[in-house]
Image (cartoon, helix red, strand yellow):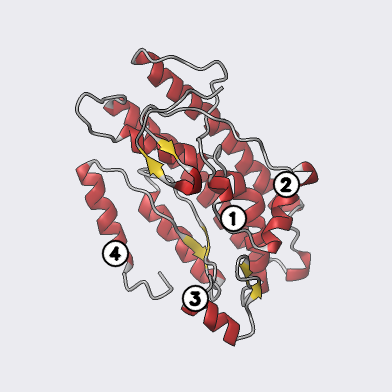
């Protein structure tokens, strides 16, 4: 654990276990990389995520630290001559150039999972939240439904941790000039992760509509999952991230967002959550 958070690893583990004991869902953000990361630190971070949410209590999202304007980190990187980009799109290179390639591969592989309204992170976050709601007269999910949902989330996390570790091991063992994030072994890892995501999204969709049908709620014709809102536009893309992201879609186009209602949850633009009446998606 880094960046002067003043918390030890066991504090996070204990907090998560306390919430589990109370039957309360939780969400968190995690900076897998920061400007002073080493391969060993990243490997330890992945291991922490596995220990923290490998059971699927919640979905594991991950990103890198950004040196936003006005922060001590921004001033430190600026003093070291490592601050790149603009105040609105800050960027930097890692001390180990292999981690620059690892990060670029991570963007190629996990962008939709981590940062898209139709990705597993956003869909599972909303579903896990709703599954644990405990309001008078509101019981949309049975204990067996919650157990199934956590099992799906555990698979989602497990596939990601496997691919992250495998990519890190490969990059560590391969000479820098021979690392190709869009070909060979790393491309196969990306394809494997994306295939697992597609399979899990089908399973999550079937689970959700089955749960709706059991409680007599209408079922939409398209039966695809996504969230209202603009999460995919609410995070900062550094210039190099834009190049990597655009390479994933023809002519730089992003995948069209799909919409669906969750019965008491709507994600507002910029990721704000409010409880409200919601509409069916088209």
- Left or right of 176 on screen, residue 268: left
- Please report whichever mark, 3 or 2, sits nearer to the chain's N-terminal start: 3
The residue to which callout 3 is attached is: 70
Disc nearest the viewer among 3 and 4? 3
**Residue at x 66%, y 47% (from the top left corner):** 190
Residue 37 is situated, as x and y percent measured from the top left of the image, at 53, 72
Report the front residue among 177 and 137.
Answer: 137
Mark 2 Cα-neighbour bin, 10 Å: few <14, some 14–19, many ≥20: some
For disc 2, the marked residue is 248
In the image shown, does 225 or 33 lie closer to the viewer? 225
Q: Marks 2 and 4, Cα distance to the nearest angstrom?
A: 38 Å
Cα separation, mark 3 vs mark 1, equals 36 Å
According to the picture, the residue beneath numbered tag 1 turns out to be 166
Q: Are marks 3 and 1 in contact (CB under 8 Å)?
A: no
Callout in the foreground (2, 1): 2
Q: Are marks 3 and 2 in contact (CB under 8 Å)?
A: no
Identify the secondary structure beneath mark 4: helix
Residue displayed at 19% across by 28% down: 136
Image coords of residue 51 (percent x, y): 37, 55
Residue at the (36%, 14%) spot, across then down:
214
Could you classify mark 4 by the number of other residues whose Cα lies within 10 Å: few (under 14), some (14-19), or many (20 or more)?
few
Which residue occupies 36% across, 54% down? 52
The residue most toward the right is: 251
Report the Cα–Cα distance between label 4 and label 1: 26 Å
Disc with the residue nearer the chain's start (4 vs 1): 4
Look at the numbered disc 3 and give the secondary structure of its residue: loop
């Amino acid at each position: 654990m880094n960046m002067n958070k003043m918390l030890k690893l066991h504090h996070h583990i204990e907090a998560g276990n306390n919430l589990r004991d109370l039957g309360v869902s939780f969400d968190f953000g995690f900076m897998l990389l920061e400007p002073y990361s080493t391969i060993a630190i990243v490997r330890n971070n992945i291991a922490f995520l596995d220990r923290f949410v490998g059971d699927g209590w919640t979905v594991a999202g991950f990103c890198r630290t950004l040196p936003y304007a006005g922060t001590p980190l921004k001033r430190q990187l600026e003093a070291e001559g490592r601050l790149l980009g603009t105040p609105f799109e800050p960027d930097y290179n890692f001390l180990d150039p292999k981690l620059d390639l690892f990060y670029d591969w991570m963007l190629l592989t996990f962008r939709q999972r981590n940062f898209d309204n139709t990705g597993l992170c956003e869909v599972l976050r909303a579903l896990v939240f709703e599954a644990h709601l405990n309001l008078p007269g509101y019981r949309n999910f049975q204990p067996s439904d919650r157990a199934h949902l956590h099992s799906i989330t555990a698979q989602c996390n497990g596939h990601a941790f496997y691919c992250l570790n495998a990519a890190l091991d490969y990059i560590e063992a391969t000479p820098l000039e021979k690392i190709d994030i869009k070909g060979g072994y790393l491309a196969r890892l990306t394809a494997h992760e994306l295939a697992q995501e597609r399979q899990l999204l089908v399973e999550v969709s079937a689970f959700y509509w089955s749960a709706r049908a059991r409680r007599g709620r209408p079922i939409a014709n398209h039966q695809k999952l996504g969230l209202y809102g603009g999460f995919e536009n609410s995070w900062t893309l550094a210039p190099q991230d834009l190049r990597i992201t655009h390479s994933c879609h023809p002519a730089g186009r992003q995948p069209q967002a799909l919409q669906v209602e969750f019965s008491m949850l709507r994600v507002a633009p910029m990721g704000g959550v409010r409880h409200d009446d919601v509409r069916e998606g088209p």
